Structure formats: C-alpha cells, structure tokens
Amino acid sequence: MFTLPSYKQLKSSLGEYDAVVQFQECARLTLMTKYEVAKQEKKIEFPDFITKESAMYGIHLHNLTTKEYPNIIFQSYLIMPNSLLEEFIDDFVDDYNSLLGVNIKLPNTKSKCKLEKLIELLSNEGILDCVQQQELDLYNYYRLIRNSFAHKLPLGNLSLASIDISYFKLKYPQFNAPNEPDTLRFDDFILFTATVKNIAYQITKSIESNINWLNFLKTNKNSFPKLVKLKGDRAITYVRNCISVKYGLTLSNEDINNSIGPFE
C-alpha cells in the first residue's frame, strides 16, 4: 500500500503519544477510584484527598477540585496531535516536491490554518477533495479548543453546532465524542487523534496517481547509493526494496530497467 515517510513518521509519533496519554488516563482513573472509596469510608473531600495523596510523593498539590481539573486535562491532550499534524504537513510538502520533482510551498493565506493552506496548495496542483469536509470541520473544532487552552484565548461561540455529529457517531460508534468545549472527555482525544491520522492518510493517498515513478527513478539515482556497486538482478532487487520500504510499492523489473537500467 502506498505511503510516505511523512505519514509513517506521523503514525509512529501519534502512537507514542497515545501510549503516554493512555498511561496518564489509567493513572487518573485509578486515583479517582481510590478517592471514591475514601469518600465513602472517610467522608473526605477531593481537595483534601488529593493533597494527602500527592504529599506521599513529595508533590504539594492544593485546592484542586473535581469540577475544574478534568476538562483542563482533556484540553491539554489536544496539543500534541495538532502539533504532529503540522509537522506532517511540512514533511509532506518535502515528500511531494521530491517525488514530483517540483519546488512548491504552502501559500501565505493568513486567514487559513496550516492544514487549509495545504488543501489550497493541492487544489492548485489539481488534487481536489483530498480531505472530507466533516473531518476538516472537526479538526478545526478541536484545533480552536487547543488554541484557546494553549494561548489562553477566548472560545467565543465555538460549539458542536458546526459539526456533523451523525457522521462521527456512524464512523466511530464506540466513542462518546465529540463533546462541547467545556465538557470534554478522554474520547475526544481519541477521536481527534483518529481524525488527524485519517486526514493525513487521505492527503497521502491523494497524490499517488500524480507520481510518475519512471521519471522519479531517472532523476533520483542519488537516492540509491549502493547502486554503483550492484549489477543485474541484484541491482533491480536493491532498487525495488528501497522503493518498497520507503513508499510501500513494488515496482516491476521492466519499470526499474526502463528508468535506471539496464543493469549489466
């Protein structure tokens, strides 16, 4: 299946971050379960409970209430997926330029976010509808919540009214999301991550048919440093393996010979 180094890196980075967040969420739920027991047995309030528990680990945590902290945590989870998608966009443009032998850059459209600038760039290249509108809307919804949290900006009138909730309920029935900005849940993080990954996948797949592999091989012989030492079937196998590992495709002997060979 066709892929790009930029997409593989995004998947890897998201997977690592998912594991960290899932660990944090397990720790939070374990602590909350412990609090529920203590509340029933000792009639202790949450601020006192968390102050006592944190002191056991040399952490001085005071005046935290169950009302305020969960949404802050869930908002903070949205920061990294957005940052990783923006990194993917930069890397994707590099991959695109390398594969198609061009030197395009994101447009400087100030009213658009980075993803919207990439969509505009691809549209100018004749690649249309590479991201579904429902997923773009949801991405922008979570991005604005993330920006509000990270930069202390007002949310204004942001709400789920702009989101096609039925689309996501049908696609991800296991998630209790999306939710309003002030009532986020862990599932909002999971949904945001899944949407980021799917958007990047759609973008990656959208350029596959635009790539002329014969031209790419002809003009990128320096991408195969061991080629000068190989001949015949070994050279063909080497080139095929390089393309397969990096881009997920298996080229034919004829394609490779016509581009770089023949290898005698």
Image (tube, helix red, strand yellow):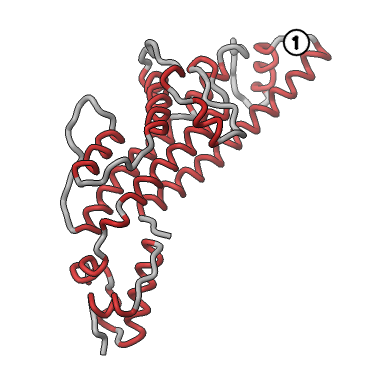
Question: For mark 1, what is the residue?
Answer: 44
Task: Tell me if mark 1 has few (under 14), some (14-19) or many (20+) residues whose alpha carbon lies within 10 angstroms of its own.
Answer: some
Q: Is residue 178 left or right of residue 121?
A: right
User: Which image quarter is the N terminus in?
Assistant: bottom left
Q: Residue at x 30, y 52 (%)?
A: 207
**Which is more toward the observer, 128 or 51?**
128
**Residue 34 lies in what quarter of the image?**
top right
**Which is more toward the observer, 24 or 91?**
91
**Residue 59 lies in what quarter of the image?**
top right
203 shown above or below 180: below
Q: Secondary structure at mark 1?
A: loop
Q: Residue at x 51, y 15 (%)?
A: 182
Query: In x, y percent, where is residue 149?
Result: 42, 20
Of all residues shown, which one is farthest toward the bottom? 264
29 shown above or below 198: above
Query: In x, y percent, where is residue 80?
Result: 43, 34
Q: Residue at x 30, y 48 (%)?
A: 92
Q: Is residue 121 left or right of residue 4?
A: left
